[in-house]
Amino acid sequence: MTDFSLACMTDQLKRLIEQDSLRLKALTSVHHLNLPEGYIAAGFVRNLVWDFLHNKCDPTPLNDVDVIYYDDQEADKGQHLYYESRLNNLMPEVKWQVRNQAMMHLRNDDRPYVNVIDAMGFWPEKETAVAVRLLDHGRLECVSAFGFESLFDLKLTHNPRRSKALFDVRIKSKAWFVHWPLLQVVNSK
């Protein structure tokens, strides 16, 4: 992928987010927390792109909003609950799920992650490993562990760092093909 095509995809993603009042409000709420490497990730970004590529007029409802951050100095293992509570106060219409990626390797039995992008590199599907955050002056920053090309190509790719069985279970349980029938499963390499 060229830098130009990456820029085009991230610009398109930013335009989609800027047109979505719920997502802008969520990003603003997370921005207020000033989390280290704080992003909203996964379906928040992925679903928006897939809805756009399926020409949906109404966005697919979000089961939850995944907030990720990276703080390897955080002493309180329950700090994420405090952040969820603050977000619930700011935006109670959303189900928030906040996780410090510096601790998630323990749950996943992986080596320690070094930042949020590294942590996303262990998620079951490559297209889910995408995130966005609101920066100062209203700018958006979009990041991905595997790039944006397969997301915009309507691919669904197993990450070999996770079991294929988990990938298959997620495809069925999330009903992605019901919502987005143009998706194509790609064999991972």
Image (cartoon, rainbow, N blue to C red):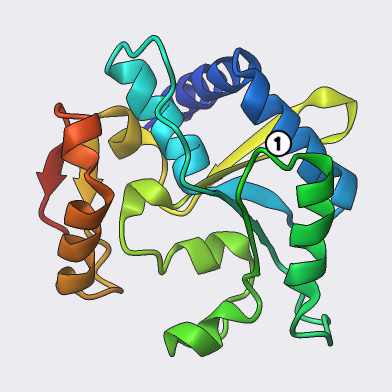
> For the residue labelled by badge 1, is the local secondary structure a helix, a strand or a loop?
helix
Residue shown at the point (35%, 46%) measured from the top left: 127
**Residue 142 seen in render:** yes
Measured as percent of width and height from the top left, residue 148 is found at: 40, 37
Q: Is residue 184 left or right of residue 157?
A: left
Give the class, few, some or many, for how many residues have Cα within 10 Å of label 1's Cα (few <14, many ≥20): many
Tell me if 26 is positioned left or right of 44 in this view: right
In which image quadrant can residue 32 be found? top right
Residue 126: give x, y in percent of width and height: 33, 53
23 left or right of 33?
A: left
Residue 129 position, x and y percent, is: 44, 52
Question: Residue tagged by mark 1?
Answer: 26
Residue in view at x 89 percent, y 25 percent = 137
Amino acid on which the number 1 mark rests in the picture: Ala
Please indicate, yes or no, whether residue 189 appears anywhere in the rendered image.
no
Residue at image position (47%, 39%) is: 62
Q: How many labels does the image show?
A: 1
Instruction: Locate residue 185 relative to residue 15 in the image: left or right.
Output: left
Residue 16 position, x and y percent, is: 53, 17
Is residue 172 depicted above or below 137 in this figure?
Answer: below
> On screen, 136 above or below 122?
above
